[in-house]
Amino acid sequence: MLKNILCYGDSLTWGYDAGKLARHRFEDRWSNVLQAELGNAAHVIEDGLNGRTTAFDDKLVAEDRNGASTLPTSLATHSPLDLVIIMLGANDMKPWVHGRAFVAANGMARLVKIVRNHTYFFEAPAPEVIMVSPPPVTRTDNVEFSEYFEGANVSSTHLAKAYRQYAEQLGCGFFDAGTVAQTTPVDGVHLDAENTRAIGKGIAPLVKATLGI
C-alpha cells in the first residue's frame, strides 16, 4: 500500500536559494529528492514555511510561524499519514526567538507529542515520526543574516546532540542532516542545491527502514 509522508519544516524544506534569492527547482528540494528515492512506494508531501520555528511566535511577520500552532492543521489536511518528518530549529536560533539548542529540542518534543496525540479522521493510527536536526548555522559576511542569527553559529552546533537525546527518550527516529549537508556561506543559514539534495538522499535509508519499504 502507498505510504504517505509529510515533510514539515522551514525554508530548508521550502527550498530557499540564497544564491539566487529564489526557490530551488522542484527536483532539487530534499523532500522531492526523497520522493525520487522512494519511487512508487510512497507519496511525499512538502510543507515548508520560511521562518517557521518549532513552537515559538515570531511577531515580525504576518504569517503564523509557530510550528506547534500550525502542525495540527497540516496533519488534518494531509491525513492519513504513515510518517511525519520534522526538520525545524534553525529559526529558533535567532536571539529574539530564544537562541538555545536545548529549548529548540523541547520544541521538537512538543511537535512529536502533537503528532502522536492528534485525533485523526476515521480513527486512523498516529504516524511514525522522524526528528531531523538541521545543518548548523555557519559564519557569513552577509550583514543582515549575521544580525538575524547572531551567535547561532555556536548554539546551532548543539542541536544534533539535544535532538538525539529527545528522540531516544520519545522513541522516535532521528537523523542528523549535518552529517550529509552544510549551510552556504552566502548567508550562513540556507542550503545550495547540492546540499539540499544530499539530505533527501541521506535520509532515504532511514525512511525505508521505518516504513518497511
Image (tube, grey):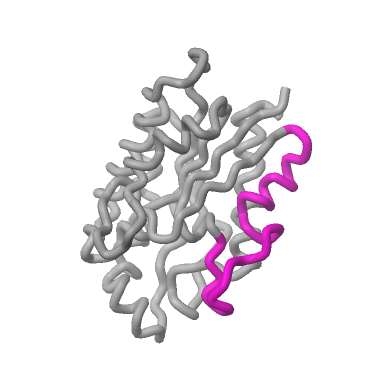
Q: Is residue 17 above or below residue 121?
A: below
Farthest residue, direction top: 123
Residue at the image position 56 percent from the left and 71 percent from the top: 17
Residue 21 painted magenta: yes
Q: Is residue 109 above or below residue 139?
A: above
Residue 182: x %, y % from top left: 52, 66
Residue at the image position 52 percent from the left and 54 percent from the top: 177
Query: In the visual, does 161 lie left or right of 7?
Result: left
Snapshot quadrant of residue 82: top right
Q: Is residue 20 above or below residue 206?
A: below
Task: Give the quarter of the figure containing the C terminus.
Answer: top right
Farthest residue, direction right: 40
Residue 213 painted magenta: no
Q: Is residue 197 above or below residue 115?
A: below
Snapshot quadrant of residue 101: bottom left
Residue 74: x %, y % from top left: 46, 38
Task: Give the quarter of the figure containing the N terminus.
Answer: top right
Is 1 in front, or is 152? Answer: 1
| Total numbered labels | 0
Residue 12: x %, y % from top left: 50, 59
- Region in magenta: 15-41
Residue 9: x %, y % from top left: 47, 50
Residue at the image position 56 percent from the left and 28 percent from the top: 81
Query: In the visual, does 31 lie left or right of 111?
Result: right
Residue at the image position 68 percent from the left and 59 percent from the top: 26
Query: In the visual, does 200 lie left or right of 160?
Result: right
